Image (cartoon, helix red, strand yellow):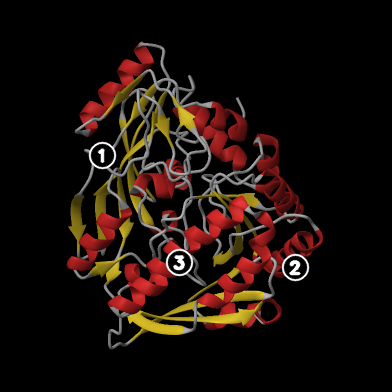
Amino acid sequence: MSSTASGKSGTWRNWAGNVTARPAREVTPASVEELSAAVRKAAADGLKVKAVGTGHSFTATAATDGVLIRPQLLTGIRNIDRENLTVTVEAGTPLKRLNMALAREGLSLTNMGDIMEQTVSGATSTGTHGTGRESGSIAAQIKGLELVTADGSVLTCSEKENPEVFAAARVGIGALGIITAITFAVEPLFLLTAREEPMTFDKVTSTFDELWAENEHFEFYWFPHTGNTNTKRNNRSAGPEKPVSRIKGWIEDEFLSNGVFQAAQLVGRTVPATIPTIAQISSKALSARTYTDIPYKVYTSPRRVRFVEMEYAVPREALVETLRELKAMVDKSDLRVSFPVEVRTAPADDIALSTASGRDSAYVAVHMFRGTPYQAYFTAAERIFTAHEGRPHWGKVHTRDADYFAGVYPRFGEFTALRDRLDPERLFQNDYLRRVLGA
């Protein structure tokens, strides 16, 4: 099944291995017409339908016991419009392929997340994002999309065509239909200079507003059980290109960030008492570095150590307080947290269920190594996030339901009303959607 997470004997598994499903059948359509026919046949057979990407969500957003649609034949670029600076791409295209193809054409997305294994439709439907002062999530860069709805018909949506569907379907969590193509805004290829450097937790939190204001893209990782963080600033550069050397890149990105980190995680999982010491060493392992390269080589990095993740978007002005509460909670608990906490930002956008919908947001992501009990840590963190009206990432672990979302998303009712109109019979329903959107 190439890079798609899957198991044997018709069992589907996600990347982290924490979600499994046994669909009644799997379909791999080679065209939009075949996909429409598969949707109509599923409805006729009384089966639910879900499309699945590469399984990078930690929630059961794509799980089904009905018909599982695999998009790997719906890949590639349909059209590049250089005059309007857009690219239209098939829904199953992995972000990695899109990024590389655009670079060859001298083009780039403005912003992206930190991994690029996901399909474009899976990433956008769950609200995948990077960090940015002015530039938002991948979904916020969508200019148009094509959607197969419950009756098998194909809707084209943009600001001008079916605008109310466009306002919702860019982050549709699979509830409105199956996306078959996406049109993204792109721009001429540019260079970014990344500056990575250690900074104390106290310094990064006390100067966060300045760090955010002075950089186009600012993010940092805090290592629990320490007062240390690693910061990263990405800003546009006139050049010249100065990529990380191959040897240095291998040592820092593969050996330290994946190889040694994996080994340390295994030790920590076996002997939790060693975790604070490992955290002190890990937080000092990566030294400061500066490099300049094309966007996808700066924004993204390989993530080979498997983990489970919870991430919440809080109002940006609540970030520092949220982080200090999180640190105080870890410090006074018996928890042993071996994975750094990732902090990013996004500007407000106009997408109904985007985590940044209508408010400038900051993201706090907590992780645990796969196979380590994570419930106690995530429950304690979630208590802090929800006290600040946090909105969980749709593709990451959380325990919230429709009642909660109705309170933190001003446009929640607009989304559910549209769903009633597009999918009255709940053909695209599953347990996850029943919980987060209501029956």
Circle 3 Cα neighbour tier, 10 Å, few/some/many (<14 / 14–19 / ≥20): many
In-front residue for pair 281/233 = 281
Q: Residue at x 60, y 35 (%)?
A: 436
Q: Which residue is drawn at 37% across and 29% down?
A: 149
Q: Which residue lies furthest to the right in this view?
A: 332
The amino acid beneath tag 2 is Arg
Q: Considering only order in the chain, which callout, 3 or 1, is on the residue closer to the N terminus?
A: 1
Query: In the image, which disc is placed on residue 238?
Result: none
Numbered circles on residues, count: 3
- The residue that disc 3 covers is 257
Q: Which residue lies furthest to the top in this view?
A: 45
In the displayed structure, 431 sits above or below 298; it is: above
The amino acid beneath tag 1 is Gln
Left or right of 400? Residue 149 is left
Considering the image in quadrants, where does the N terminus appear? Answer: top left
- The residue that disc 2 covers is 324
- The residue that disc 1 covers is 72
Q: Considering only order in the chain, which callout, 2 or 3, is on the residue closer to the N terminus?
A: 3
Q: Are marks 3 and 2 in contact (CB under 8 Å)?
A: no
